[in-house]
Each structure stands twice: as C-alpha cells, then as structure tokens.
Amino acid sequence: MEWIQKLKNIMGPDIISDENEVLENYASDHTEDFVYLPQVVAVPNNVNEVSVIVAFCNKNNIPVTPRGAGTGLSGGSLPIAGGVSLSLEKFNKILDIDEVNFQATVESGVINEAFQQAVKEKGLFYPPDPASKGSCFLGGNIAHSSGGPKALKYGTTKDYVLNLEVVLPNGKIIWTGADTLKNSTGYNLTQLMIGSEGTLGIVTKIVFKLLPLPKHDLLMLASFTSIEDACKAVPQIFINGISPSALELMEYNAVDYVIKHSNLSFELDTETAAFLLIEVDGNDKNQLFTDCEGINEVLEANNVQEVQFADTSDQKEKLWKIRRSIGEMVKLHSVYKEEDTVVKRANLPKLMKGVKEIGAEYGFESVCYGHAGDGNLHVNILKGEMSDTRWNGPHLEEAIRKIFRLCKKLGGTISGEHGIGLVQKKYMNEVLAPIHFELMKGIKKTFDPNGIMNPGKIWE
Ligand code: 2HG
Ligand code: ZN
C-alpha cells in the first residue's frame, strides 16, 4: 500500500514494520481471545517521532491505535480499524524523582512496578497498583485511570497525575497543566486525558505526585461460608471507624482456579464460600494492631469462619500473589468476558446476589473477586463449554445488560477501572443519556476532527 511505503520512507524500517510476525505481536491484548491485525506497527523512540507519525496519519486519514503493554481488559489497544498500532514500549525511562517536592517525571512506557520500586528506594510512595503492575505501563494506567487494591485508601491513577505531555491527533505536542499540587487555570485538560483511552491523543510523559512511604502494614485473610456475610462485613469495617489500605474479596472458585493453574499452594476448605483480604498501613504499628482488633470484631459479628494473619513478608507476598493472579489464572481455565462492575459499597451484597441469580437464569459460571472496599467487583463470565453462537449472541448480551442495569439501580456504573474500550461500548447507553454522548463526541471532534485516534472505542 502506498501510504505504508511512504511512512516507511519517512521514519525508516527500525521504527515502521509491516512484517506479519511483527503485526501478530500487536494484534491482541488481555481482552478475551480477540485478534485484530494492524497494517503497520510503529515503535517510535521519542516524542518528535510520535508527532511526525501522528501528523502523517492525520493528513492521510490513517487510524492510529496507541498501545502500552497490551494488558488492558476492555480492548482499548486493539487496532480494530487497521492502520497503525503505535507502541510506547521505548518510552521506558524514569526521567526525574524529585525527593524535595515529592514528584516524579516519567515516560509513559515505564512499567508500573518498576516505578513503584524506584520511588520506594527513596522512601517515597506511588500507590496505584493494578494486578498487572509487573508488566502494565503507566501510560496505559492513565488511559483507564487504573486502580488496584490500594485505590481504596489512596485513590486511583487520576489522583496522582499533575501534568501530561501529549501528542494531539494533529501532531502538535502540548503539556496539559503545570507541575504543581494545585492548578485552577481553565479547563482541566490533564483530567480530561485521563480515562480517555487513547481517543484524544498519545501521552508521552507524565508528572506524578508522590506520598511518603508508610512504614508498616498488616495483612489478614478472613474466610466465610457465605459470600453475602463477607460482603456485609465490608461497609461495617468503615462504620467501625477503620479505613483499610486494601479490602479485597475473592470467591472460592477464584482461589480454586489459581491453585489449579499456578504453582501457588493454598489449603482450601470446601465449606468456604469467599475470602476477604484486608490490609491496614501507617506509621504507628500499635494503631494498626488496634485497627485489626476493630476489624476482627466486625468479622466475628458477620459469622467469619476463620481469620489468619500473615506474619512474615513471604506470607504477605504469597497472599497478594494469589489475589493478583486470579485474572490470569481464570483465563487459563476458560476464555471469559470481564465485567468491571462498581456500586455503592454497602450495595455489594445485593450486587453479588444479583450476579449469581442472573448467572443461574442465563446458564453461565461467574468468578467474582476484586476491590470490595470500593464496591468494585470483577465479574468473570466463563465461556466454558458454551457454543460460540451463544457466547457472541444476544442471549449473553441480555444477561450482561441485566448485570449493568442492576449496577445502575445500586447507585453504580459499568466500569470502575478497566475502561469501556471495545467490549463495553454497546452497554454505555445503560448508564449515560444522549446528552452525555453529545458532549463527549463534541470534545472528541475538537481534539480529533478526522477521527483518526483510536477509532471505534468508547462509543458505538
Ligand atoms: C484485578 O483486580 C485487576 O485483578 C485485573 O483489575 C487488571 O490486569 C490487571 O491489572
Ligand atoms: Zn481490579
């Protein structure tokens, strides 16, 4: 194709490739089992190269799909319209850690955990910790405002971004804000970019704010013979005056699939229906023990089966590994559709009950787990033995719609931290009115009049 040759001539073969085995590496992310081949893969080295590629695509009406590590669960980085898959994998430098101002400047292809470790070595703390923190890029975290367990106490990615360097769809390079803790200077373009899933521009640099690293943490695992009891305990912990740093729910089958498909060992009691994994952190160890006593009171009032404390850092790491690997291990068990439901925290028991009832009515197994303290429950709907027709057909779509209607009824919405991307866009009308679409499309048109930037995402 003529445009491909032209782009190759401009950028060179080290940056632009249309070889089949390269295209295949950029055709999937972690969403179900989707494969969409781009026509070209671009791997630029710096912001000026991104700008040249994007300006070329804008002039020639070529779709550009930005790509981080490809760990997304809503299909945001799938190049569904062909064109260019633009990878930020070479943007992997931590440029500055400012220990005096508690800020850091990074390129957008830095791995989340590498960043966390680097600031930790200086006694600083970057809390957002998605389960895929060992591989996901900070730029991808910006695209979806990713959370993770610590979002409960510390907030999601959006709460740590001060300023962004962005390549706009016309190729212009801008900074969206200022490197300050406060900024009340016009519309907040920084926050507009966060969660925009690569539809408004490509983030190349990020200025984050940081916190002092908490000195201590304690971790407890509570088992319940009833999921509803586990869910009911969650809001009561806060009502009892305690604010845990993480409060995660794991259904029995979630832990079971981790044990079956990984080398992690854990003794599961078949009477157990669900677990709560609860962490408290802070600088005063005695206070943390007092918090754990308060939590224990609530657990006991809600018929807890057993409470175990993780005594060593190895035990803590093992429990967190089990929790973090659920998504991946369930995928080894079966292809699944991931629903990122979120409701008001105290409505969690109703959400859980409703999901199981809908599963029974429509004939699917679900694995439920996630950030119970945030009311954010990941519902993995397993394909199992389901036929492709049923899997892709109106029957399952109706079931998912019912789940989302229930979320809305319970004061919630259809995604807490995974974004809309490709797979949830048909359900957006369950929670947004026509006026919301009009406003968002107006914003999109202002940024990207030719509609080249990650087309086909967020809206039908
Ligand atoms: C989880 O809570 C995550 O397990 C999965 O939401 C997302 O891959 C991820 O980080
Ligand atoms: Zn999650």
Image: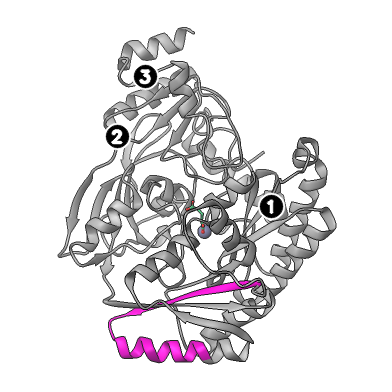
Q: Residue at x 69, y 57 (%)?
A: 366
Q: Quadrant of the C terminus?
A: top right
Q: In this view of the protein, can residue 187 be seen by the observer? A: no
> Within the image, what quadrant is residue 35 found in?
top right
Give the mark nearest the N terminus, 3 or 1.
Answer: 3
Q: Quadrant of residue 281?
A: bottom left
Asked if labels 1 and 3 touch by Cβ distance under 8 angstroms, the answer is no
Q: Kindly identify which numbered label has been placed on residue 90.
A: 2
First along the sequence among labels 1 and 2 = 2
Q: Secondary structure at mark 1?
A: strand
Query: Looking at this rendering, what residue extends furthest in the right direction?
Result: 361
Camera-nearest label, 3 or 1: 1
Residue 40's place in the image compared with 456, above or below, is above
Q: Position of residue 398 (x, y in %)?
A: 80, 50
Residue that carries the numbered disc 1 in the rendered image? 381
Q: CA distance from mark 3 to mark 1?
A: 38 Å
Task: Give the residue number, with chain letter if any, for mark 3.
Answer: 16
- Observer-nearest residue: 209 or 80? 80
Which of 396 and 364 lies nearest the eye of the viewer? 364
Query: Could you tell me which residue is drawn at 29 percent across and 38 percent down?
Result: 91
Mark 2, other Cα within 10 Å: few <14 / some 14–19 / many ≥20 = some
Query: What kind of residue is marked 2?
Result: Lys
320 part of magenta stretch: no
Q: How many badges with numbers are in the image?
A: 3
Residue at image position (72%, 73%) is 350
Callout 3, which amino acid? Ile
Residue that lies at the very extreme toward the left in this rendered image? 100
Q: Residues within 10 Å of mark 3 (few under 14, many from 20)?
A: many
Looking at the rendering, the stretch of residues picked out in magenta corresponds to 273-296
Q: Earlier in the sequence, mark 3 or mark 2?
A: 3
Q: Position of residue 108 (x, y in %)?
A: 33, 43
Q: Which one is nearer the viewer's eye here, 168 or 428?
A: 428
